[in-house]
Image (tube, rainbow, N blue to C red):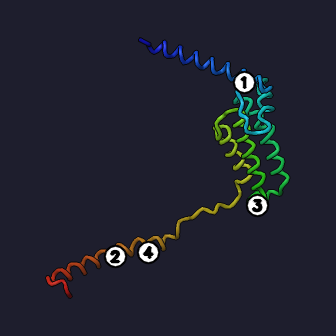
């Protein structure tokens, strides 16, 4: 009978076997990186090769994010007049390029996207570049309108009750 520790040992064995097999197939294709690498984008192999010199994937992602995505985005945003930052047509391409860059690197390094670091950076970008943009959110109506909208049904309820009582008081229900 197998115990939990035997099952755990078997799982570790299969994990090691699969990692060895994947390293062999990666070396046959001319690519070997200890991190594992996605292959949907052209630069994945380049990003993963860079990451062999950085201890963890997250640190590598942070470095690549800074150099490849963030700095070019900030430079392109600063090249636009700050009064034009609030016009979506002026920043849409820059913003989308930045977003796709962060996603592509994360996918290459097999890191979930969005992640905490990316979310924090997007918040920082919004507070830096889009803080003074007008917000088109809906606001509450003036108190007089709210009062009228609330009082109308409240006043109609007693009138409806009186009409129902008068109608049923006759007993015939036809009048």
**With 97 as the anchor, is 12 left or right in this view?**
left
Numbered mark located on residue 70 in the image: none
CA gap between label 3 and label 4 equals: 40 Å
| Quarter in which the N terminus is drawn | top left
Q: Is residue 106 left or right of residue 1?
A: right
Report which residue position mark 1 lands on: 25
Secondary structure state at the residue bearing disc 4: helix
Q: Position of residue 84 (x, y in %)?
A: 79, 60
- 1 or 4: tag closer to the N-terminus: 1
Distance Cα–Cα, label 2 vs label 1: 78 Å
What residue did someone put label 4 on?
Answer: 148
Instruction: For mark 1, give the secondary structure.
Output: helix
The residue that appears at 23% across and 78% down in the rendered structure is: 164
Under circle 3, the secondary element is: helix
Crowd around label 4: few <14 · some 14–19 · many ≥20 (10 Å): few
**Secondary structure type for disc 2:** helix
Question: Earlier along the polypeptide chain: callout 4 or callout 2?
Answer: 4
- Which residue is under mark 2? 155
* Front residue (pair 166, 128): 166
Whether residues under marks 3 and 1 lie with C-beta atoms below 8 angstroms apart, the answer is no
Q: Residues within 10 Å of mark 3 (few under 14, many from 20)?
A: few
Specify whether 77 is left or right of 7.
right
State the residue position of label 3: 89
Residue 89: x, y in percent?
76, 61
Q: Earlier in the sequence, mark 3 or mark 4?
A: 3
Query: Badges 3 and 2: C-beta atoms under 8 Å apart?
Result: no
The earlier-in-sequence mark between 3 and 2 is: 3
């Amino acid at each position: 009978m197998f115990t939990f520790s035997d099952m755990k040992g078997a799982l570790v064995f299969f994990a090691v076997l699969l990692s060895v097999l994947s390293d062999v197939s990666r070396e046959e294709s001319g690519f070997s990186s200890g991190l594992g690498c996605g292959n949907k984008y052209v630069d994945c192999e380049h990003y993963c090769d860079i990451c062999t010199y950085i201890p963890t994937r997250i640190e590598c992602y942070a470095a690549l994010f800074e150099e490849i995505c963030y700095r070019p985005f900030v430079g392109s945003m600063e090249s636009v007049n700050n009064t034009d930052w609030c016009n979506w047509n002026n920043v849409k391409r820059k913003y989308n390029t930045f977003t796709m860059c962060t996603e592509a690197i994360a996918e290459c390094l097999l890191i979930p996207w969005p992640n905490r670091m990316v979310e924090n950076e997007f918040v920082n970008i919004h507070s830096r570049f889009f803080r003074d943009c007008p917000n088109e959110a809906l606001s509450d109506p003036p108190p007089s309108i709210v009062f009228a909208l609330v009082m109308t049904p409240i006043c109609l309820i007693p009138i409806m009750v009186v009409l129902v009582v008068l109608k049923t008081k006759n007993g015939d229900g036809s009048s």
